[in-house]
Image (cartoon, rainbow, N blue to C red):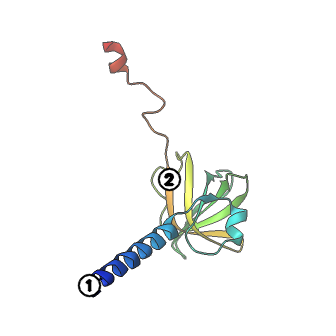
């Protein structure tokens, strides 16, 4: 075989391996707070709902939005998010916080607010009247 062909094949294999490795690192499944406490890394995904019965608010000293969230297993923990309260936070069906546990607080780097869809619950009246 020619040396160019060999180097080309090796390059393709190395490139594909690097892409697959990076892709596998970015995939994460949802865990609860108990599992997040024993996991390593700062991209842990915890899904749950806002616990409105406990205090929440924005701290101007630390520039963080702090609230309590109940995960899918029923565990409630304090969440610290580095930014203002997201839009539609109170109307969210589900929250996904991405970060890591530090003691009893989940420090979130990012947050996904999953709001109810206006298309799932209601059939558009103008379409049903035309039938």
- Residue 80 lies in quadrant: bottom right
Residue at image point 51% right, 63% down: 27
**Number of numbered tags placed on the structure image:** 2
**Residue position for label 1:** 4
Horizontal arrangement in the rendering, residue 128 relative to residue 46 (left or right): left
N-terminal of the pair, mark 2 or mark 1, is: 1
Callout 2–callout 1 Cβ contact below 8 Å: no
Residue at image point 42% right, 24% down: 123
Horizontal arrangement in the rendering, residue 89 relative to residue 41 (left or right): left
Spot the residue most to the front: 1
Q: Quadrant of the C terminus?
A: top left
Image position, residue 74 (x, y; %): 73, 52
Q: Which of the numbered marks, if any, corresponds to residue 26?
A: none
Image position, residue 122 (x, y; %): 45, 27
Query: In the rendered view, would you say 88 is above or below 84?
Result: above
Residue at image point 66% right, 64% down: 78
Image position, residue 61 (x, y; %): 54, 76
Query: In the rendered view, would you say 88 is above or below 61?
Result: above
Horizontal arrangement in the rendering, residue 63 relative to residue 131 (left or right): right
- Residue 76 lies in quadrant: bottom right
**Residue position for label 2:** 113
Q: Nearer the viewer, residue 15 or 131?
A: 15
Spot the residue most to the bottom: 3
The label nearer to you, 2 versus 1, is 1
């Amino acid at each position: 075989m020619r040396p160019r062909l060999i180097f080309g094949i090796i390059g393709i294999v190395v490139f594909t391996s690097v892409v697959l490795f990076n892709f596998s690192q970015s995939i994460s499944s949802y865990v609860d707070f108990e599992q997040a406490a024993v996991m390593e890394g700062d991209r842990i995904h915890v899904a749950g709902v806002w616990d409105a019965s406990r205090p929440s608010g924005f701290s101007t000293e630390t520039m963080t939005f702090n609230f309590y969230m109940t995960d899918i297993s029923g565990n409630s923990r304090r969440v610290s998010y580095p930014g203002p309260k997201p839009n539609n936070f109170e109307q969210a069906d589900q929250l996904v916080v991405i970060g890591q546990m530090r003691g009893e607080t989940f420090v979130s780097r990012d947050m996904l607010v999953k709001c109810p869809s206006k298309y799932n619950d209601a059939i558009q009246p103008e379409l049903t009247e035309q039938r």
